[in-house]
Image (cartoon, rainbow, N blue to C red):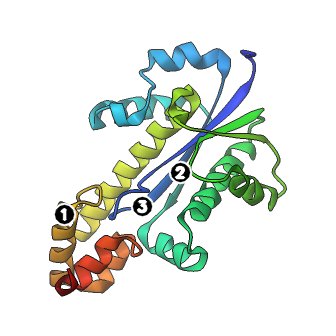
Amino acid sequence: MSESRRVVGVDESGKGDFFGPLVIASFLAPDAELENLAALGVRDSKKISDNKLLQIDEKLRAAYPHALVIIGPEKYNQLYEKIRNLNKLLAWGHARAIENILNDNPADLAISDKFGKPELIENSLFENGRKIQLQQLVRGESILQVAAASILARAGFLREMKKLSDRFKVELPRGASSLVDRAGLKIFQEHGPEILAKLAKKHFKNYQRVVNPTLF
């Protein structure tokens, strides 16, 4: 491994959350920066508390090239209605995040956490004439550039969730549990389906449990 190799890490947050956006982040650093990234506390975002994660995110965004693709619930629902496949939607978002980095920065390799066939991202990239070596790895967060991207994506998701909660004056729990169903049902009963479409991903089973509670 050459320390001069410039690696783009890509990861997403919000994929498994009924409420809120899908956020895809890309992060670029040469392998020579791995020691510095580790010193900042970069590791799998799922192992970091929210407060600590937001602190690391701020340092990463100040020091390294990065990009965020934020797909809010309304846009997400429009795209899913058109694409009808979550992996293809993810590939589209990953490709956009990689492109946004490559617009201003040279890179040798892009690595993402594995979620589907690699050619889904490659095909989406090539549509816009972008060519870069791409790897998809199981447990991709073991690569620190991917771990950094996972931090940026989750921090972006947390910020967007707060914006939605503040805008609509509702508390939005994360995940897709029965607690989420109860919050969704309360929002639906108080505000109707229109606001739910602005807050949640409609293809989740939670949506049907909320709008048709007598069916379950």
How many residues crowd mark 1 within 10 Å: few (<14), some (14–19), many (20+)?
few
Residue 42 position within the rendered picture, expressed as x and y whole percent measured from the top left: 45, 25
Instruction: Find out whether the residues at labels 2 and 1 contact each other: C-beta distance under 8 Å.
Output: no
Residue type pointed to by label 2: Ile
What residue appears at the point 22 percent right and 72 percent down from the top-left corner? 184
Q: CA distance from mark 3 to mark 2?
A: 10 Å
Of callouts 2 and 1, which one flags the residue occurring earlier in the amino acid sequence? 2
Q: Residue furthest front?
A: 216
How many residues crowd mark 2 within 10 Å: few (<14), some (14–19), many (20+)?
many
Circle 1 residue:
178
Viewer-closest of 16 and 48: 16
What residue appears at the point 35 percent right and 70 percent down from the top-left corner? 200
Residue type pointed to by label 1: Ser
Relative to 180, does residue 41 appear above or below in the rendering? above
Q: Is residue 16 left or right of residue 115?
A: left
Residue type pointed to by label 3: Pro
**SS at mark 2 in the image:** strand
Residue 146 position within the rendered picture, expressed as x and y whole percent measured from the top left: 56, 34
Residue 63 position within the rendered picture, expressed as x and y whole percent measured from the top left: 55, 28
Circle 2 residue:
24
- Is residue 171 visible to the viewer in this orientation of the structure? no
Q: Is residue 100 left or right of residue 138?
A: right
Counting every numbered tag in the picture gives 3
**SS at mark 1 in the image:** helix
- Is residue 131 visible to the viewer in this orientation of the structure? yes
Q: CA distance from mark 2 to mark 1?
A: 26 Å
Circle 3 residue:
21
- Which mark, residue 98? none
**SS at mark 3 in the image:** loop
Q: Nearer the viewer, mark 2 or mark 1?
A: 1
Which of the image's four quarters has the N terminus?
top right
